[in-house]
Image (cartoon, rainbow, N blue to C red):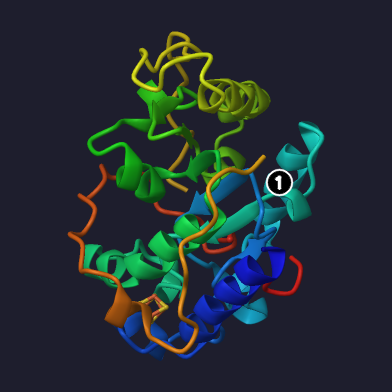
Amino acid sequence: MTDDRAVALEAIAAQVQTCTRCALHKSRTKAVPGAGSPYAEIMFIGEGPGYNEDKQGLPFVGRSGNYLTELIESIGLTRGDVFITNVVKCRPPENRDPLPDEMATCRPYLDEQQAIIDPLVIVTLGRFSMGRYFPGGKITAIHGRPKYEGGRAYIPLFHPAAVLRNPALEEPMAEDFRRILDVLAEVKRRRAGDVADEAPAEAMAEAPIEVPPPAAPPAKTAPPPPASPQRSLFETLPPEPAAPAAPPEPPPSPDDNKPTQLSLF
Ligand code: SF4
């Protein structure tokens, strides 16, 4: 099974690396499919590759990537234990925000990665991946609060680059991260049948942490579905609507990598 998942993820990566389905392919150096364990229990989803990710073809390798690595290691895990990817696989020019049509066009890749890995916990990093699972959510109000749905938990977190631009967010971010393993344990308990999945989702939730605005703008269960490495995702997956646009947020610093180890898989 390990090989099956790895092969399926490699097939997606191969499609991403040669994809020309949206305009972002024109300005990329390397596409960034994602990286990590095919059996990850926790999947991190960021926004899109930044400067360093675009050069290396790997997710979260710049300054914000180093910070994300520190956070992951702070809860006793390594990057090899999780899977890290983004909502768009190619760097938007000048690190601009990804456009709704770009996210919609790229969505089948992320959908398939999620289906293959079947993570127990999905951690969104920043407003664009948050918008995929928490439409209309406001990050300052819901960060760190898990939603349990379909035998999985979703946790919205600040984007690491945003925290680096606003040190006041460091402690809330660290606190949210410390909650991830508790949420993972809760998902396992629910999957084991101790708690109905339909039970209120706020078992782990606390009152939102009020944070000041930025200082300046700046364990596995079901097997994966079969994937056909020889066929395009766009031939096998039905079209889905674009995620709703998220509320505006301060633009990233040019030096901050947008949201993105090992060989691809
Ligand atoms: S962002 Fe996604 S859809 Fe657009 S070219 Fe890159 S891989 Fe293809």
Whether residue 241 sits left or right of residue 84 in the image: it is: left
Q: Nearer the viewer, residue 60 or 8?
A: 8
Q: Quadrant of ligand 1?
A: bottom left
Whether residue 2 sits left or right of residue 203 in the image: it is: right
- Quadrant (top left, top right, bottom left, bottom right) of the N terminus: bottom right
Q: Nearer the viewer, residue 240 or 194?
A: 194
Q: Classify 67 as above or below 29.
A: above
Q: Nearer the viewer, residue 167 or 122?
A: 122
- Quadrant (top left, top right, bottom left, bottom right) of the C terminus: bottom right
The answer to which image quadrant residue 75 occupies is top right
Q: Can you see residue 58?
A: no
- Residue 179 in the image: state x and y as whole percent: 62, 22
Q: Can you see residue 219?
A: yes
Give me the residue at 50% from left, 44% from top: 125
Name the residue beneath numbered marker 1: 67
Label 1 lies in ligand 1 vicinity (Cβ under 8 Å): no
Whether residue 7 sits left or right of residue 241 in the image: it is: right
Whether residue 58 sits left or right of residue 230 in the image: it is: right
- Residue 59 in the image: state x and y as whole percent: 62, 64
Give me the residue at 39% from left, 90% from top: 26
Give me the residue at 28% from left, 72% from top: 105
Q: Classify 120 as above or below 243.
A: above
How many marks on residues? 1
- Residue kind at label 1, given as amino acid type: Tyr
- Residue 212 in the image: state x and y as whole percent: 45, 22
Q: Classify 247 as above or below 105.
A: above
Q: Classify 135 as above or below 181.
A: below
- Residue 33 in the image: state x and y as whole percent: 54, 72
Secondary structure of the residue carrying numbered label 1: helix
